[in-house]
Image (spheres, grey):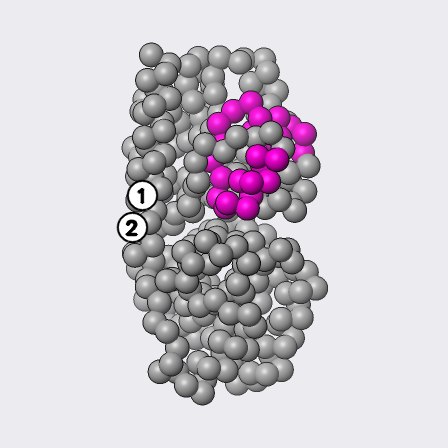
Amino acid sequence: MDTYHILNFHEIFAENAFCLSQRLGIELVKDFQPEKDHTYIIFGAHNQAATLHSIQVSNPYFKYIIINGEPPQSDVLRNKYYLSLMKNNIVFDYHPISSEYLKSLGIRVFSEYIFDFPQLKNSSEREIDILFVGSRNERREAVYKKLVERYPDKRIEFHMDWKQGNHEDLTKLLHRSKVALNIPYYNSNILETHRINKALACGCEVVSLYSGHKPTDEFYDKYIHLCHDFFEYFDQADMCPDLVEKKLPYNHLVGALSHNLTHIKWLLDELIKRKN
């Protein structure tokens, strides 16, 4: 694996890049100096798409592996440099719906990538009953308003101006929370698995709307509470807590992650063989 390196260009993926580096024994580098015949696994490539594209055009003797974590509706997938990077390099993608969309653009997805996070010990009291962290939109504001009106005795916090600049602050916030919500930004309801996996790794119960993608919902149903309406979950949790299904903790999800990593490692080994 000496010819592979991992780079990260967005703070939100810092823990994912670290975990992949540790699990595969691949160097996580900060100073990007491309070497001939080396391959660079990149998180947050959309953040430096034009620069990465320019570097490869002027020096075509190395390769990127782009890890895409953006849904089809994202403006990032309108960026011509980012699309060119994915068309001319290897792509790992986070969700089957996204992978199908990339395929329709002529981009081949070589592997799924499941977001992996470290599990850190928590000594904090979980005084926040319901937490949401993410960008602001009308849908999320409406959910917040309805939850506060219906459950005035619960401590409900929505951080919708979160800059995603410090994963340590996010970890502390999640460690203080009992339940973390996944409210998809887009109406397609594609599961935002980065948010879900981070909250699970921090020991939160996760409540999410169904995504409408049956295989993904079935996969996550073992770990999170899926519902058509958030009241559906919280009303039952308040009135009949014994009837709320117990979900598997994050360390069980790690088992599924190991299968994903095994496939990625096999793929990387195959690429080395082809070079030789």
Residue 81 colored magenta?
yes
Dot 2 lies on which element? helix
In the rendered image, which residue does mark 1 sit on?
Answer: 259
Residue at the spot 41% in from the left edge and 18% down from the top edge: 38
In the rendered image, which residue does mark 2 sit on?
Answer: 255
From the top left corner, tell me how far across and down residue 57 is, in percent.
59, 16
Q: Is residue 139 left or right of residue 22?
A: right
Residue 124 colored magenta?
no
Please provide the residue range marked out in magenta: 79-104
Against 117, residue 123 (above or below) is: below
From the top left corner, tell me how far across and down residue 229 is, in percent.
56, 72
From the top left corner, tell me how far across and down residue 270 is, in percent.
34, 23
Dot 1 lies on which element? helix
> Residue 30: in sight, yes or no?
no
> Residue 77: in sight, yes or no?
yes
What's the CA distance linking mark 2 and mark 1? 7 Å
Magenta stretch prevailing secondary structure: helix
Q: Quick one: 77 or 164, which is closer to the camera?
A: 77
Three-letter amino acid code of the residue under disc 2: Gly
